[in-house]
């Protein structure tokens, strides 16, 4: 059985490290170190501290001594977004899952699945009925197996840095 626990503020450096792992998998290239790491850490510290963001993690296993504190091998992070309600989602609250990552040497052991399942429980406990994510090609089968399906609403993005 995979032991998943809620992340705490002290896990911030490891969550940022795993974010780089996730970005490398999504983009096919390891991201360069830079200000994004400090900004991500600041956001994690603030939002983990106030409860507006949830992260669930798996500590690095050590067969001889048990989990290694302070070293993570997997995570799933999510937030609750508030928008105006509509007929399909009267409260306007929805979940967004992001930063699902497993260290390469620890993949195919159910760690990401366990973290995402715990995050989905967190949403259910809060009455969040709608949860979105953007899957990587490698992760899509996992998410579909957990009940995610294509949405009828396309996503468009404006990058204000280019305007």
Image: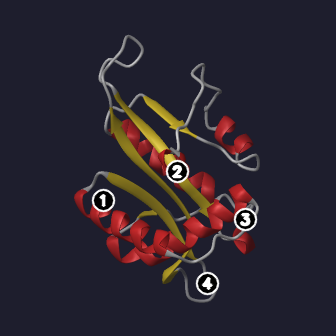
Image mark for residue 47: 1
Circle 2 sits in a helix, a strand or a loop, which is it?
Answer: strand
| Residue 23 location, quadrant | bottom right
Circle 3 sits in a helix, a strand or a loop, which is it?
Answer: loop
Circle 1 sits in a helix, a strand or a loop, which is it?
Answer: helix
- Real-space Cα separation, disc 4 to disc 1, in angstroms: 30 Å
- Real-space Cα separation, disc 3 to disc 2, in angstroms: 18 Å
Q: Earlier in the sequence, mark 4 or mark 1?
A: 1
According to the picture, the residue beneath numbered tag 4 turns out to be 62
Q: Residue furthest top?
A: 87
User: In the rendered view, does 157 fall on the left or right side of 106?
Assistant: left
- Real-space Cα separation, disc 1 to disc 2, in angstroms: 14 Å
According to the picture, the residue beneath numbered tag 3 turns out to be 107
User: In the rendered view, does 1 fall on the left or right side of 46?
Assistant: right
According to the picture, the residue beneath numbered tag 2 turns out to be 98
Residue 73 visible within the image: no
Query: Which is more foreground, mark 3 or mark 1?
Result: 1
Q: Residue at x 66, y 58 (%)?
A: 110
- Real-space Cα separation, disc 4 to disc 2, in angstroms: 27 Å
Residue 27's x, y, as percent?
71, 58
Q: Residue furthest front?
A: 163
Query: Which is more foreground, mark 3 or mark 2?
Result: 2
Tags 4 and 1 in contact by the CB under 8 Å rule? no
- Real-space Cα separation, disc 3 to disc 4, in angstroms: 15 Å
Residue 54's x, y, as percent?
38, 54
Query: Which is more foreground, mark 4 or mark 2?
Result: 2
Front in this rendered view, residue 11 or 137: 137
């Amino acid at each position: 059985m995979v032991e998943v626990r809620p992340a705490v503020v002290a896990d911030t450096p490891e969550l940022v490290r795993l974010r780089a792992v996730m970005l490398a998998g999504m983009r096919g290239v390891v991201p360069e170190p830079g200000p994004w790491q400090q900004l991500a850490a600041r956001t994690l510290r603030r939002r983990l501290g106030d409860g507006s963001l949830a992260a669930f993690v798996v500590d690095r296993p050590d067969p001889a001594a048990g989990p290694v504190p302070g070293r993570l091998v997997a995570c799933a992070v999510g937030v609750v977004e508030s928008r105006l309600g509509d007929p399909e989602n009267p409260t306007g609250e929805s979940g967004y899952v992001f930063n699902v990552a497993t260290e390469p040497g620890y993949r195919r052991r159910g760690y990401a699945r366990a973290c995402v399942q715990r995050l989905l429980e967190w949403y259910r406990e809060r009455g969040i009925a709608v949860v979105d994510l953007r899957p990587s090609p490698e992760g899509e089968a996992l998410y579909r197996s957990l009940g995610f399906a294509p949405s009828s609403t396309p996503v468009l993005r404006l990058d204000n840095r280019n305007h």
